[in-house]
Structures are given as structure tokens and as C-alpha cells.
Image (tube, grey):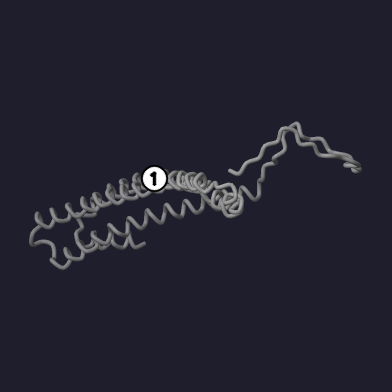
Amino acid sequence: MLCIAQMVLIAVAAPFAAISFPIVSVIVYLVQRFYLRTSRQLRFLDLEAKSPLYTQFNEILEGLATIRAFGWQGFVEDKAKDLLNRSQRPFYLLFAVQRWLTLVLDFVVAGIATILIVLVVVLRGKLSAGYVGVALLNVVLFSQSIKLLITFWTQLETHIGSVARIKNFTTDPTAEDKDTEDHIPPATWPSHGKIEFNDITAFHR
């Protein structure tokens, strides 16, 4: 609504500038469509890259006594640094995409401002100075509003996707049993039993 109101004010102040609005709308839609898909995938990659790091933190806290006893501090620290570096790659790429979005939208707004200034020069004396000032002010504010619009739109899509994944995970869980593992033991099982360990090795990850 804020973007629409600013576009209306620009159109009222400089009616000829409204000719560029359909073109600007198409450009913004294409940019949003490209940015939305890219940003969504990068956010998914960011979540997947951070998951091993959080798992590593939990394992370190749970096995801290074992790590100290065997002197594995250096190994654990190197692995944690490696996981930390990997987890930051999608974040930096997402930051770069956001800067690209800012650059493209600034170019779009600069195009609108250029059209407005050209009209002011060509139609010198026919446009009110107050209207021109209102139009220029709203062009500057329109840049910020359109960036917030696309950013919040992307965040909404990402959050909706997260909610959908959680819903699918809770409502449609997949069984871990294999297709051949359909044997049902009798009610008296186990009547007796024992456990044998053959060639078993264990280590702390």
C-alpha cells in the first residue's frame, strides 16, 4: 500500500512520469521472481550448512570429559573451524544476492528519477515546483519502500516454506523400516536371549 501510494503521488505530481510505471512494475516483478527463488534456495543451504555445526556443538558438550581425557582438543577444534567455514558460505552468497537486489532496484529508481527530471526540464513552467518537489521526495522514498517490499515478501515465502516442511515432517512421517522388515515377533518373544559383540569398534566423532 505504501508503494502504491507513493506511485500515485508521483503520478499526480508528474502525470507523464506515470508512463514508466507499467515498465517498472514488470522489471520489479522479474527481479522479485529471480531474487525470491535464489534467496529461498540459499536460505535452505544456509540451514543445511549450519546443522552439522550445531550437532558438533552438542557432541562437544556431551563428550567434553572424553575429549579432555584423550587429548582430542586440537582435532575437535580443527573440525569445528572447518564446519564453521562451511556454514558461512551460503550466508555470504545470500549477502551478495541482497546487495545485487539493492543495486538493481537503485538503478530502477534512478531511471524513474531521470525520467522525472527530463520531464521537468522539457515541460519547464508547466509543472508546479511544489509538485515536482513532492515527486522527487517520493521517488527517493519509493526506492526504500520497494526494497522492503521485496525483502519482506521473500522472508514471508521462506517462513511459509519452513512451516510447510515442519507440517509435512509431523503429519507424514516416513517409516525407517525397510520393505523386507515386516516380521512380527510372537507375543512370548523374547523368552531368552543374549548379546554378542563381534569385531566392534567405536570412536568419538
x and y percent of residue 128 in the render? 13, 65
Residue at point 31%, 50% (across, down): 99
The amino acid on which the numbered mark 1 sits, given as a three-letter code, is Arg
Give the residue furthest to the bottom.
Answer: 130
Label 1 element class: helix
x and y percent of residue 2 in the render? 34, 63
Question: As rendered, which of 44 and 21 lies closer to the eye?
Answer: 44
Task: Please tell me how crowded label 1 is: few (under 14), some (14-19), or many (20+) other residues with Cα within 10 Å.
Answer: few
Question: As rendered, which of 5 and 36 lies closer to the eye?
Answer: 36
Task: Please tell me whether residue 56 is drawn above or below residue 2 in the rendered image.
Answer: above
Is residue 88 rendered to the left or right of residue 197? left
x and y percent of residue 164 in the render? 56, 50
Q: Which residue is mark 1?
A: 33
Residue at point 46%, 55% (across, down): 156
Residue at point 37%, 43% (across, down): 34
Kindly tell me whether residue 144 is visible in this rendering: yes
